[in-house]
Image (spheres, grey):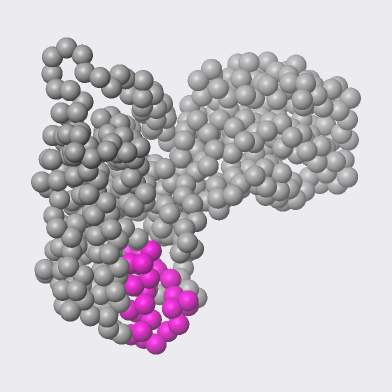
């Protein structure tokens, strides 16, 4: 917990300077140094312990270590000794952006790190004895005292810290426990025997039945030629191109899914060789996981096999309705394979209509009252639905972000109007720049298109609280959940 991680910084030999009396009392402004040193060690413990919350804590679990703390401690003493007034801005920059930020590769994590740092290097820490690090007041910087005085306070901290000290909502504990439980069950499933014992179906029978069931539900591939005739590439409607590109991707995926299911049924019957790929697929399907063979051609998804198949069929139905009934009034943003191409298509339509360079445009966002449907298409831009918010809720009365209810981990977002607008006209006042991800894993890799495989965009959500509040909460929007 916090007290163990925190106390370690004061005890551990690797940061001997902290426990060295000559160093501890070696500043011309010892009260300021002691309090800011305490704050710095608290900050170090916070960034370390946030990792246990998974993607809510950090998109990528960074290995912050004692060398980051050591150099920051020495810089803190040097700056306090050399300046009459504590240079908080310089300290925040060196510690947050350089010493710790040098390890951070994700821009959303860097934003979080700076936000957390701003809670600990403040004039109030030194000047206000009532200043606290958490709303409950359980965590604060003790008043000036000897080295042992600080140790006594650290020992008094709760063994199990409340998520509030990290800036997180109390629901973060539930998310953390769920992740640990899921990891445990995954480990248990891996160790299960593959042979049947006693009565009941054998694993081979189970997979044969499952494969045939999925095959029976899979529709035929989309006819790209027919779609091209009905929705030709035109200057004024980029969505036709988006549709065709999406159908090509889904045809590739469904071809792999269909053929691999046919092959595994044949392999179980002994009609074809059970290759290494098919054997791996057999093992994955047996424990309810999406086979790697499919995942290599698939959109990002953390769903188990049953939910993945249902989700895939829903996506195929969405595009079939688009082909049959025409361009939707409201797009199901979760249904796209490559979401960024859809967003580019929406921007391109606006750019061509008003003769504005596309690189001068961005989106403004308006959350509507309706949950899923609208009576007509917007004049400009697109309506989308299917988004979820993690770490907060969308308040339907105030039409702003609000605190999540206890034990409610996710909330749905009503229809959102994505309106193209020139970047110079976009206002960022009274909003939270919420990152939108395809899955709750949040982290992704840079694909060959230059886009992240997971991050989609920043969506500006109306809020009456400062950005830092939601950044520390780890609030993000997701296009799909894990179940």
Quarter of the picture containing the C terminus is top left
Report which quarter residue 415 is drawn in. Answer: bottom left
Measured from the top left, where is residue 280 in percent x and y? 33, 35
**Magenta part of the chain:** 340-368
* Residue 40 higher or lower than 414, as above or below: above
Can you say which quadrant of the picture contains the N terminus?
top right
Residue 64 higher or lower than 7, as above or below: below
User: Does the magenta stretch mainly form a helix, a strand or a loop?
Assistant: helix
348 inside magenta stretch: yes
Q: Residue at x 82, y 27 (%)?
A: 17
User: Vertically, is 203 above or below 383?
Assistant: above
Residue 452 inside the magenta-drawn segment:
no
Residue farthest to the bottom? 355
Q: Residue at x 36, y 24 (%)?
A: 190
Residue 302 visible in this rendered orientation of the protein: no
Q: Where is residue 177 drawn, in percent x and y?
A: 39, 26
């Amino acid at each position: 917990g916090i007290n163990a991680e925190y106390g370690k910084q004061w005890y551990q030999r690797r940061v001997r300077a902290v426990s060295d009396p000559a160093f501890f009392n070696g500043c011309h402004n010892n009260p300021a140094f002691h309090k800011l040193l305490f704050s710095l060690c608290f900050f170090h413990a916070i960034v370390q312990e946030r990792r246990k919350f998974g993607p809510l804590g950090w998109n990528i679990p960074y290995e912050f270590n004692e060398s980051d703390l050591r150099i920051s401690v020495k810089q803190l003493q040097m700056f306090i000794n050399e300046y009459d007034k504590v240079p908080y801005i310089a300290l925040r920059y060196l510690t947050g952006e350089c010493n710790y930020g040098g390890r951070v590769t994700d821009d959303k994590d860097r934003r979080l790190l700076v936000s957390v740092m701003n809670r600990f290097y403040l004039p109030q820490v030194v000047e206000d004895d009532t200043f606290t690090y958490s709303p409950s007041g359980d965590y604060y910087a003790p008043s000036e005292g000897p080295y042992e005085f600080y140790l006594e306070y650290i020992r008094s901290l709760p063994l199990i810290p409340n998520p509030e000290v990290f800036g997180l909502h109390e629901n973060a504990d539930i998310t953390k426990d769920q992740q640990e439980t899921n990891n445990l069950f995954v480990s248990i499933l891996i160790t299960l025997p593959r042979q049947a014992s006693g009565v009941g179906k054998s694993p081979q029978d189970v997979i044969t039945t499952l494969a045939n069931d999925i095959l029976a539900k899979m529709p035929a591939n989309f006819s790209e030629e027919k779609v091209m005739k009905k929705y030709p590439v035109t200057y004024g409607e980029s969505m036709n191109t988006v549709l065709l590109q999406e159908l090509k991707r889904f045809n590739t995926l469904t071809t792999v899914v269909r053929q691999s299911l046919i092959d595994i049924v044949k392999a179980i019957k002994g009609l074809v060789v059970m290759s290494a790929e098919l054997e791996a697929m057999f093992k994955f399907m047996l424990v309810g996981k999406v086979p790697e063979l499919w995942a290599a051609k698939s959109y990002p998804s953390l769903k188990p096999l049953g939910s993945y198949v249902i989700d895939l069929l829903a996506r195929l139905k969405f595009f079939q309705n688009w082909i049959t009934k025409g361009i939707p009034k409201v797009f199901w943003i979760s249904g796209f394979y490559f979401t960024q191409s859809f967003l580019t298509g929406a921007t391109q339509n606006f750019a061509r209509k008003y003769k504005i360079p596309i690189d001068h445009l961005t989106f403004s966002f308006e959350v509507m009252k309706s949950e899923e449907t609208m009576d007509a298409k917007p004049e400009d831009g697109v309506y989308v639905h299917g988004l979820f918010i993690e770490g907060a809720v969308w308040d339907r009365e105030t039409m702003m972000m609000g605190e999540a209810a206890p034990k409610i981990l996710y909330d749905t977002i009503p229809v959102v109007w994505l309106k193209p607008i020139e970047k110079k006209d976009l206002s960022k006042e009274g909003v939270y720049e919420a990152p939108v991800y395809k899955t709750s894993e949040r982290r992704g890799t840079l694909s060959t298109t230059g886009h992240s495989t997971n991050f989609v965009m920043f969506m500006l959500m109306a809020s009456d609280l400062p950005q830092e509040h939601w950044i520390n909460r780890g609030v993000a929007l997701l296009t799909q959940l894990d179940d």
